[in-house]
Amino acid sequence: MKLLDGKKLSVEIKDEMAGEVSEIVKSGQRPPHLAAVLVGSNPASTFYVKSKVKNCKKIGFESTLIEKSADTSEAELLGIIDQLNQRDDIDGYIVQLPLPDHIDEERVNLAIDHRKDVDGFHPVNFGRMAQGMPAFLPATPYGILMMLERYDIDTTGKHCVVVGRSNIVGTPMSILMSRKNKPGNCTVTLTHSRTKDIGAELRRADIVIAAIGKPNFVTADMIKEGAVVIDVGINRVEDSSKKKGYRIVGDVDFDNVSPKCSYITPVPGGVGLMTVTALLKNTLHARNKSIYS
Ligand code: GUN
């Protein structure tokens, strides 16, 4: 069994990006600039947004964090989005999800200029991705593709089973893994909460992508010998032996599943770090106008 080391890989890719940024700056141009909008103070969202901003700084990107209180109106948020769409000094931005209940996430998503949608959530980017056109890919699936590519994992003709059909991970991942691409070219099964027997589907998988948000959901009896297992889950479980009172586990029962795998991602230290790296990569694409001129 080999670990797919998201920590090592994200450092490697971020170093490459830092090199590109210094070339951009040396040539007299401004560095890439990512903005993030955070509404409210959900602890997980606050943590993720701050980590995105911190990572920008590390590789020489500019970043702007716009923090608004949880009672911010939808109209005010749409006003901020309008300004971000218009600012020439900002290449891309994200609105951290989830938003408070009184704000319509769909309306917000549609208001984002797709040319600045480095989250890849806007239907224009989603549609372009589905048709194999240049697009901002959603960060987690993009991070997983980079991981498969850099570890040279052969996906062609393999059976990939995705667990979870979210708009952010499961659904786009299933599309990308089936596209005529490398990585890609898989036969894909997308499983979800109404799938009759997820275990039976998983047992046929050469590649498993678990993104269901349930701690230790994928157990050893569901895994074929030699499978590649990608664990997207970041779940808090109570643990009184930890200072914080909890620890982070994935969607996969790592201890029992890992001996059966050819490759597996750890949690933490796997997909999560690649997600931030992929967002930075999208911001660099936005700065270089490599997707939309
Ligand atoms: N909430 C959970 N994941 C994400 C993400 O990738 N982007 C944004 N904007 N919000 C999220």
Image (spheres, grey):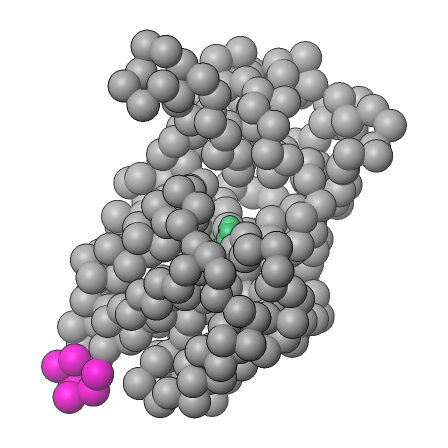
In the image, 170 versus 34, the foreground residue is: 34
In the rendered image, residue 26 lying in the magenta stretch gets the answer yes
Q: Is residue 191 above or below residue 122?
A: above
Q: As drawn, which residue projects farthest toward the front? A: 71
Residue at image location 33% in from the left, 56% down from the top: 52
Q: Is residue 87 above or below residue 49?
A: below
Task: Characterize the magenta stretch by its predominant secondary structure.
Answer: loop
Q: Which residues are magenta?
A: 25-30
The x and y percentages for residue 29 are 20, 87
Residue at image location 39% in from the left, 64% down from the top: 68
The answer to whether residue 113 is left or right of residue 42 is right
Q: Quadrant of residue 14?
A: bottom left
The x and y percentages for residue 212 are 64, 35
Q: As drawn, which residue projects farthest toward the left? A: 26
Residue at image location 55% in from the left, 76% down from the top: 75
The answer to whether residue 271 is left or right of residue 141 is left
Q: Quadrant of residue 131?
A: bottom right
Q: Is residue 267 visible?
A: yes
The N terminus: image quadrant? top left
The x and y percentages for residue 253 are 54, 18
The answer to whether residue 191 is left or right of residue 216 is right
Q: Is residue 129 visible?
A: no
In the image, 101 versus 186, the foreground residue is: 101
The answer to whether residue 262 is left or right of residue 162 is left
Residue at image location 55% in from the left, 55% down from the top: 100
The x and y percentages for residue 56 are 26, 62
In the image, 46 versus 70, the foreground residue is: 70
